[in-house]
Image (spheres, rainbow, N blue to C red):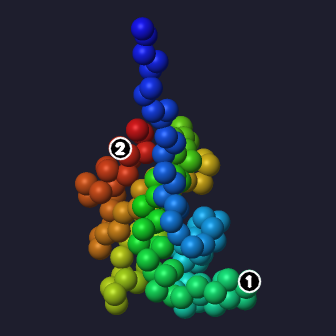
């Protein structure tokens, strides 16, 4: 007599949002608002309350701790490869009371390739070479 294969069917992977009281859309919006706009946890709490969602600021803090790495990993594939055309902007800014040179390499799609801050003119420093090398990759 043959026995039927009774192996369990593979279960789908459990969602990272499983077990939370609020829908995943609410959690993602709250974490994105906090990260994107630099709001405080209480500001995000107030924005959600205006939309009829009552959440404590501590809950938002816990969501940010838990879901920030997941959102960062999900957004990473959206980054473009460095383009074949790029430019470097040079600016002189005051940082902590001292003037510094800031170099920022940007490709043709507007993606920031690298940022380099130095106390002296950076054209002769190794950091400048790092920007050029990173832009050529």
Residue 48 percent coordinates (x, y): 66, 83
Looking at the picture, does residue 128 appear above or below residue 135?
Answer: below
Residue 51 percent coordinates (x, y): 74, 83
Estimate the spatial distance between the alpha carbons at disc 2 and disc 1, rounded to whole Å.
48 Å
Q: Which mark is residue 133?
A: 2
Q: Which residue is located at x 29 percent, y 57 percent?
A: 127
Q: Nearer the viewer, mark 2 or mark 1?
A: 1
SS for dot 2: helix
Furthest toward the top, the residue is 1
Q: Nearer the viewer, residue 14 or 111?
A: 14
Residue 46 in sight here: yes
Going from the N terminus, do you reach mark 2 or mark 1 first? Answer: 1
Furthest toward the right, the residue is 51
**Which corner quadrant of the image does residue 96 belong to?**
bottom left
Q: Which residue is located at x 37 percent, y 83 percent?
A: 95
Q: Which mark is residue 51?
A: 1
**Which corner quadrant of the image does residue 101 belong to?**
bottom left
- The quadrant the C terminus occupies is top left
Q: Which residue is located at x 62 percent, y 49 percent?
A: 109
């Amino acid at each position: 007599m043959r026995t039927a294969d009774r192996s369990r069917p593979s279960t789908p992977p459990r969602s990272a949002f499983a077990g939370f009281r609020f829908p995943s859309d609410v959690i993602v919006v709250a974490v994105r608002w906090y990260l994107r706009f630099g709001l405080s946890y209480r500001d995000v709490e107030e924005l959600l309350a205006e939309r009829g969602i009552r959440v404590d600021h501590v809950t938002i803090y816990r969501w940010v701790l838990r879901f920030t790495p997941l959102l960062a990993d999900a957004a990473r594939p959206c980054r473009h490869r460095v383009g074949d055309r790029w430019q470097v902007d040079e600016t002189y800014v005051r940082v902590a009371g001292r003037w510094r040179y800031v170099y920022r390499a940007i490709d043709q799609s507007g993606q920031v390739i690298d940022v380099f801050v130095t106390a002296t003119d950076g054209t002769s420093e190794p950091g400048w070479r790092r920007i050029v090398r990173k832009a050529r990759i």
